[in-house]
C-alpha cells in the first residue's frame, strides 16, 4: 500500500520581510493507487509541493508520509518515489536502454538479467522497443516523453510524481498521451501526483483534483464535484471553459439585485445566502440560454422562466464549430458569456433575451468567496 499524506505542509523561501510563503498549510491525502492532479495558476505552489514530496526541496513545516512513514528527513534517493519532469531530463549521450537502466542502477541492487527484463517489459508496455538503441537526440518529443515515463516505470516505485509532463507536446499528441497515461496509471495502479496548470488536463485525468491558489489549498474533490459544487469562487472560475460568469449583486429579501436586475431566489437559496452582505451570482456559459424571441421563452420550458429572463445585446459571437460562444451585455451593464449550439445563427449586435435558470446558479459570498449555494 502506498498512501501519500501531506499534513499541514508549509514551504517558506527565505526569511523575514522578503520571504515567500509558497505553500501554506496544505493537507492532502492521496489514496493507494489514486491519480491525484494538483492544479492551479502559475506560481500557486504546485511544483514546490511536488518537489517537497520528491525530497528535492526541504519542508518548512508539517509532515509528508508515505505508507505512514515520515519522509521529511529522507533524501530523494531514499524515498521510493519516481519523478517525471516537463523537460524529460534524459541523458543525451546514453541510449534509451541506458537511460532507462540508469535509474535502476542508481536506486536498486537488481542483477543484470532482472534489470534487462524490466527495461524490456516497460519498453513493450510503452511501445518503444524499437527505440531502445537510439539516443534521445534521434527521438521525437512524444518518444522522449515515453522514455522519460519508462525511466520512472522500470523502478516500480511506490509513487509517481509528474510535473507538467505533457506540456512540451503539440495539442494533438498531448491529448493522445493524456489518455494513454491515464490508462497506464490505471493498469499499473501506482499512486500518482500529477501537476498541471491546465484545467482540462486536471478534469480529464484525475481521480481527484487538488486546486491550489497562492499557496493555499482551495478544494480537493473529484473533477465533477469541483465542477458542479465548487467550494468557492476561485475554483468556480478556474474549472470550466469558458469560465463561469460572475455577476456582483446585493441581497434584497428573496432576490439578488442590482440596477435594473432583479433575480428571485427559491426559498432554499434565499435561506442559504441570507447572512451575506454582498454576493456574487455564478452561472456557467452552457447553462445560460439565449433566445432571439422577444418573449424569451423559446428554449425555456419551466414555468418560472419569465422572472429569470433578461434583455441583453450580443457583443460578439465566436463560432467554435460544435458550439458558438456568445458574448453578451445585460441591460444594466454586466457581461455574460453563453455557449449555444454551433448551428444556431445569432448575429453580432442582436437584441436577445437570456434565461439564467434558477436550478443552475451558484451564489458566493462576495467578501470571502465561499460558496453559499
Ligand atoms: P508554475 O506553474 O509557473 O511552475 P507553480 O505553481 O509550480 O508555478 P512554484 O514554482 O511552486 O509555483 O512557486 C510558488 C511560489 O514560490 C512562487 O511565488 C515562486 O516565485 C516561489 N518560489 C519558487 N521557488 C523559489 C525559490 N527557490 N526561491 C524563492 N521563491 C521561490
Image (cartoon, rainbow, N blue to C red):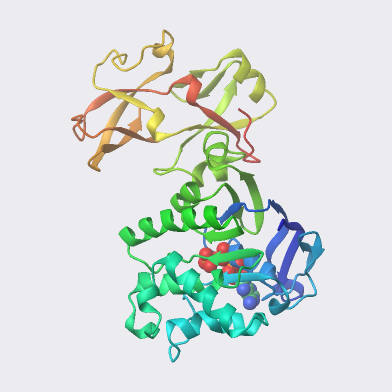
Residue 43 visible, this orientation: no
Residue 214: image quadrant is bottom right
Q: How many numbered callouts?
A: 0
Q: Tell me where residue 90 appears, x and y as whole percent.
A: 47, 82
Residue 22: image quadrant is bottom right
Q: Tell me where residue 191 appears, x and y as whole percent.
A: 63, 57
Q: Give above or below for 121 relative to 290.
A: below
Name the residue: 62% across, 16% down.
268
Name the residue: 39% across, 83% down.
136
In the displayed image of the protein, which residue is found farthest to the top? 303
Name the residue: 72% across, 56% down.
1
Q: Nearer the viewer, residue 290 or 330?
A: 290
Q: Nearer the viewer, residue 311 or 161?
A: 161
In the displayed image of the protein, which residue is found farthest to the bottom? 93
Name the residue: 57% across, 34% down.
229
Q: Nearer the viewer, residue 372 or 137?
A: 137
In the figure, is residue 209 to the left or right of 99?
right
Q: Give above or below for 347 relative to 26.
A: above
In the figure, is residue 254 to the left or right of 358?
right
In the displayed image of the protein, which residue is found farthest to the front? 113
Q: Tell me where residue 146 appears, x and y as whole percent.
A: 43, 70
Q: Quadrant of ligand 1?
A: bottom right
Amino acid at each position: 500500500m502506498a498512501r501519500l499524506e501531506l499534513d499541514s505542509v508549509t514551504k517558506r523561501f527565505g526569511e523575514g520581510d522578503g520571504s515567500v510563503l509558497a505553500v501554506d498549510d496544505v493537507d492532502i491525502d492521496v489514496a493507494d493507487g489514486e491519480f491525484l492532479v494538483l492544479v492551479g495558476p502559475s506560481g500557486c505552489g504546485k511544483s514546490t509541493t511536488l518537489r517537497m514530496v520528491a525530497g528535492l526541496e526541504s519542508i518548512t513545516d508539517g509532515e509528508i508520509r508515505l505508507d505512514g512513514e515520515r519522509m521529511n528527513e529522507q533524501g530523494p534517493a531514499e524515498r521510493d518515489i519516481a519523478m517525471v519532469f516537463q523537460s524529460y531530463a534524459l541523458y543525451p549521450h546514453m541510449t534509451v536502454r541506458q537511460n532507462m537502466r540508469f535509474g535502476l542502477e542508481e536506486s536498486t541492487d537488481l542483477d543484470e538479467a532482472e534489470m534487462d527484463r524490466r527495461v524490456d517489459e516497460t519498453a513493450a508496455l510503452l511501445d518503444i522497443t524499437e527505440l531502445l538503441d537510439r539516443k534521445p537526440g534521434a527521438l521525437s518529443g512524444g518518444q522522449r516523453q515515453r522514455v522519460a515515463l519508462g525511466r520512472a516505470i522500470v523502478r516500480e516505485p511506490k509513487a509517481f510524481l509528474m510535473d507538467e509532463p505533457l506540456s512540451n507536446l503539440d495539442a494533438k499528441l498531448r491529448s493522445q498521451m493524456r489518455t494513454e497515461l491515464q490508462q497506464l496509471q490505471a493498469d499499473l495502479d501506482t499512486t500518482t501526483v500529477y501537476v498541471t496548470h491546465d484545467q482540462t488536463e486536471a478534469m480529464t485525468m484525475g481521480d481527484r483534483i487538488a486546486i491550489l491558489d497562492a499557496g493555499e489549498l482551495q478544494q480537493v474533490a473529484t473533477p465533477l464535484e469541483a465542477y458542479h459544487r465548487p467550494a468557492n469562487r476561485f475554483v468556480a472560475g478556474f474549472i470550466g471553459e469558458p469560465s463561469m460568469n460572475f455577476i456582483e449583486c446585493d441581497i434584497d429579501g428573496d432576490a439578488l439585485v442590482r440596477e435594473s436586475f432583479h433575480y428571485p431566489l427559491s426559498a432554499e437559496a434565499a435561506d442559504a445566502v441570507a447572512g451575506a452582505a454582498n454576493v456574487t451570482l455564478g452561472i456557467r456559459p452552457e447553462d445560460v440560454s439565449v433566445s432571439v424571441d422577444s418573449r424569451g421563452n423559446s428554449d425555456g420550458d419551466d414555468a418560472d422562466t419569465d422572472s429569470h429572463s433578461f434583455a441583453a445585446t450580443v457583443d460578439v459571437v465566436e463560432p467554435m464549430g460544435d458550439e458558438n460562444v456568445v458574448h453578451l451585455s445585460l441591460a444594466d451593464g454586466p457581461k455574460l458569456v453563453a455557449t449555444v449550439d454551433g448551428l444556431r445563427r445569432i448575429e453580432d449586435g442582436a437584441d436577445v433575451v437570456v434565461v439564467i435558470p434558477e436550478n443552475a446558479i451558484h451564489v458566493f459570498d462576495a467578501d470571502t468567496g465561499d460558496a453559499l449555494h
